[in-house]
């Protein structure tokens, strides 16, 4: 299984969207400074996780979510969390 996830940094009011096949390890990497693009905004909390059966499906959803405005992203989170 693959997961599309939305993380939120409450300290910086920022969202991050990604996909992985190991959610626990991925969140650890984001919060431990291993990911250069997200390390300045840690700590991150999980706002939404969507399960997909293939990586291709996960990549398609990830791309769609990254194109949403912050307000539309919040609406998505409310609907699917």
Image (cartoon, rainbow, N blue to C red):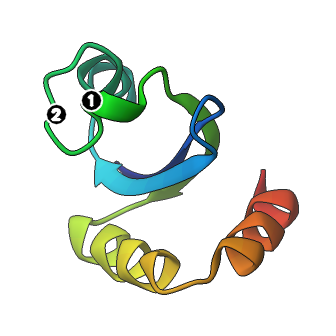
Q: Which residue is mark 2?
A: 35
In the figure, is residue 71 to the left or right of 67? right
Q: Is residue 9 above or below residue 78?
A: above
Task: Please tell me in which quadrant of the rendered image residue 31 appears.
Answer: top left
Q: For label 2, count other residues whose C-alpha is less than 10 Å away and answer few (under 14), some (14-19) or many (20+).
A: few
Res. 35 image quadrant: top left
Which of the numbered marks, if any, corresponds to residue 39? 1
Q: Nearer the viewer, residue 41 or 60?
A: 41
Look at the numbered disc 2 and give the secondary structure of its residue.
Answer: loop
Q: Is residue 7 above or below residue 25?
A: below
Of labels 2 and 1, the one closer to you: 1
Percent position (x, y) of residue 29? Answer: 23, 22
Separation of marks 2 and 1 at Cα, in angstroms: 6 Å
Looking at the image, can residue 49 be seen?
Answer: no
Query: At which x and y percent is residue 4?
Result: 44, 56
The reply to whether dot 2 and dot 1 touch (C-beta < 8 Å) is yes
**Residue drawn 57% across the image and 39% down it:** 12
The image position of residue 73, as x and y in percent, is: 68, 71
Dot 1: what SS? Answer: helix
- Asked whether the viewer can see residue 17, the reply is yes
For image coordinates 64% across by 45% down, the residue present is: 13
**Quick one: 32 or 57, which is closer to the camera?**
32
Mark 1 surroundings: few (<14), some (14-19) or many (≥20) residues within 10 A? some
């Amino acid at each position: 299984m693959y997961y599309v996830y939305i993380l939120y940094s409450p300290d910086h009011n920022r969202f991050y969207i990604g996909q992985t096949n190991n959610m626990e390890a991925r969140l650890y990497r984001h919060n431990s400074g291993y990911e250069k693009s997200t390390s300045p905004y840690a700590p991150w909390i999980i706002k939404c996780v969507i399960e997909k059966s293939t990586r291709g499906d996960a990549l398609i959803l990830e791309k769609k979510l990254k194109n949403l405005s912050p307000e539309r992203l919040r609406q998505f989170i409310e609907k699917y969390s």
